[in-house]
Amino acid sequence: MLALTPGNRAQRLWILAAILSLSIAACSTSPVGQRSSATVRASFTGQSSSTTPPDDKVMSLPLSAIMDAATDDLRLLAAAENKLRAQCMKDRGFDQVTNVRYDDAGLFNLDRRYAHVTPEVARERGIDLSTWKPLAAATEPMPAFARSDDFSALHGEVRDYPDGSRRPDGTGCEALAAEEIYGNAERRYGFSGWDALLKVNEDSYVQTMASEGVRAAESSWSQCMKRAGYDYASPQEPLADYPVDPSNVEILRVPVSNAELATAVADANCRIETNLKEVYFATESQIQLELIETHSDAVRSVRSELDDALTRANEIMSSD
């Protein structure tokens, strides 16, 4: 995972918003503004929690209890932002605006985090990010810097900045709506303490992959793959053999090869046989708990700012 400068991060965020109609995976609580201690404990201990994504009800990383989202809260935040955006665009003479959406998978979907798929999915889609390929055939790339009046009204005027980035200037309805709800135009990414917790998220993953327990599990995976006819030392190696760039639609349109499909099925079966996902999860959960202990100020700050955003979203939806 690469560190982004503030300028590059902002530019990347707004381009993704324009292309994908902004999928919000905002961190949140349930019920609104609160998360019970029982829910937090469940997430820390790997027990079932109603706020975790459907596929990961039994396994939820500790950071998920702090940063990730309950569906009801995501809907509330998105609805409030859509209401403000629509009114702002109407005031500027535009009757239609693309709504923001939320991501059901959340930030800590473990299948995605650990590149885990079932053999059935692997047989259809291939290795990891090849799951983008079936979605790409009908997708046309959007110009990186649109110039239409409605685009400018929504996203703002695109300007060059001293840090070398090129991004909207914060005068668009999108930024104004986000600022009213979250207190900043970058939504939860602008929360005080958010970058520190993202660094915890990155560090915990790196430490997990370097741990002795994970290396032993990956060695068992490697032996399983050899029995299936493949010579890979780690699960990362097949990804290098079949790379995918999600930003390159032309690459995504290339059909998945039979060789990739066969490799993906063997990989999926060996991950299951060696309990690789479970080993990753148990190891990273402990590492995250230890790292979180040293970032209590960031945890409190993120939770407080999120609660404030949810309160404002409720007020917006309750107003005429």
Image (cartoon, helix red, strand yellow):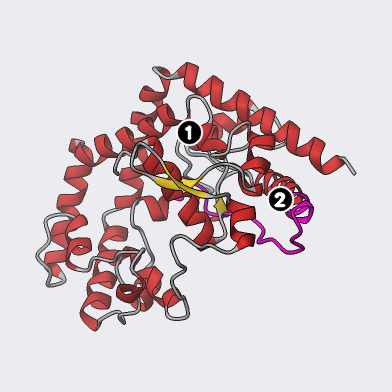
Image x and y of residue 196, in percent? 41, 27
Q: Are marks 2 and 1 in contact (CB under 8 Å)?
A: no
Disc 2 crowd rating (10 Å Cα; few below 14, some 14-19, many 20+) is many
123 in relation to 201, above or below:
below
Image x and y of residue 305, in percent? 61, 27
Would you say residue 34 is visible in this rendering? no
Q: Which residues are magenta?
A: 85-109
Residue 226 image-quadrant placement: bottom left
Q: Is residue 116 magenta?
A: no
Badge 1 element: helix
**Relative to residue 64, is residue 251 drawn left or right?**
left
Query: Where is mark 1, residue-wise?
Result: 45
Image x and y of residue 269, in percent? 29, 66
Q: Which image quadrant: the N terminus?
A: top left
168 in relation to 122, above or below:
above
Query: Where is mark 2, residue-wise?
Result: 85
Precedes in sequence: disc 2 or disc 1? 1
